[in-house]
Amino acid sequence: MKSKIFILILLFAFVLTSCSTKNDFGEPEINPENIEKNFSKWWLYHSENIILSKDFIPISESNKVLDKKDFFEKLVTGNYIPLKLNSKDVLTYYKLYKLSDSANKSIVREIKGGSKTSFKHFKMEGKKFPEFNFTDLKGVSYNSKNTLGKLVVVKCWFIHCVACIKEFPELNELVKINETNENVLFISLAEDNSKDLKHFLSKTPLNYSTIPEQKGFMKNNLKVKLFPTHIVIGKDGKIKKMVNYANELFEFLEKEGLNVDVEIKDVVKIPPPR
């Protein structure tokens, strides 16, 4: 009799757990079968709903919470896409969906490449920013010691990067509305020489303190391959966030207590159908 009661209790607990597992995080906002065969449909969904740099709770195929490292390791295989769950709380949940053999191969390549970048940025969080000793175009020096105790926002760019220049207005506004905040610095690292930068910035201003000829530092020390790249250094000299898009930067800075009341325009461009 006792054994039967024990089995019934176990079965009841299993049912409760199963129901809870199914409903805790919500359901996907879209049927993945409707997008996995069409690159344009998938990209439209992905670019509007998935931001891998933000704070999110990773969910496995079987509705279990994953370690974020494990989540990224699955994504970089190109065998999965993340789906946003329509949760009942304010948290963001991304669930892994395994692509079928008939999935569009361009989706596989795109998710693999994009996930590698996001995973690399994630792994940079918590690492010490490389030792530096910069002098900007106005002769002001910034180094690993005199910037401690401040939040340092770094932009990596070069003159001929169209995407880098396009976000200047929003970044300038960000600097302007935080100009009285003595606890934050805005520094840009540029590939170009001083002469070219001064000429360019005289016509297209950037309110960051700009450091010339930093191609080697960005490539060798920061491993930056995509532009623009934004890096937030904490008051302890460690990297807190590394992203490519201004909207992702602004979302993080808002959580850090900065005023980010800036309208972001044309963040993501939809690629052509494949």
Image: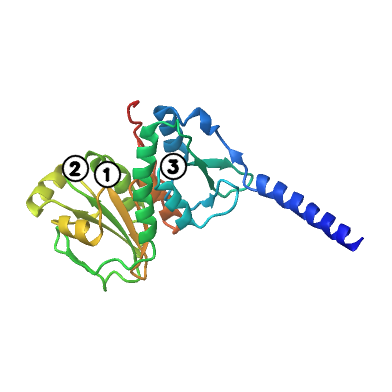
- The CA span between labels 3 and 2 is 43 Å
The amino acid beneath tag 2 is Thr
The colour scheme is rainbow
Q: Are marks 1 and 2 in contact (CB under 8 Å)?
A: yes
Q: How crowded is mark 1: few (under 14 residues within 10 Å), some or many (20 or more)?
A: some
Identify the secondary structure beneath mark 1: helix
* Nearer to us: label 1 or label 3: 3
Q: In this view, does 268 lie above or below 59?
A: above
Towards the viewer: 68 or 251: 68
Residue 19 x/y as whole percent = 72, 47
Q: Residues within 10 Å of mark 2 (few under 14, many from 20)?
A: few
> Which of the numbered marks, if any, corresponds to residue 79?
3
> Which of the numbered marks, if any, corresponds to residue 252?
none
Residue 3 x/y as whole percent = 86, 61
Upstream in sequence: badge 1 or badge 2: 1
Q: Is residue 29 above or below residue 202?
A: above
Towards the viewer: 175 or 134: 134
- The CA span between labels 1 and 2 is 8 Å
Residue 178 x/y as whole percent = 36, 55
Left or right? Give the position of 67 relative to 258.
right
Q: Name the residue under label 1.
A: 168
Upstream in sequence: badge 1 or badge 3: 3
At horizontal 16% and vertical 41% (from top left) the residue drawn is 160
Residue that lies at the very extreme toward the left in this rendered image = 195
- The quadrant of the picture occupied by the C terminus is top left
At horizontal 44% and vertical 45% (from top left) the residue drawn is 51
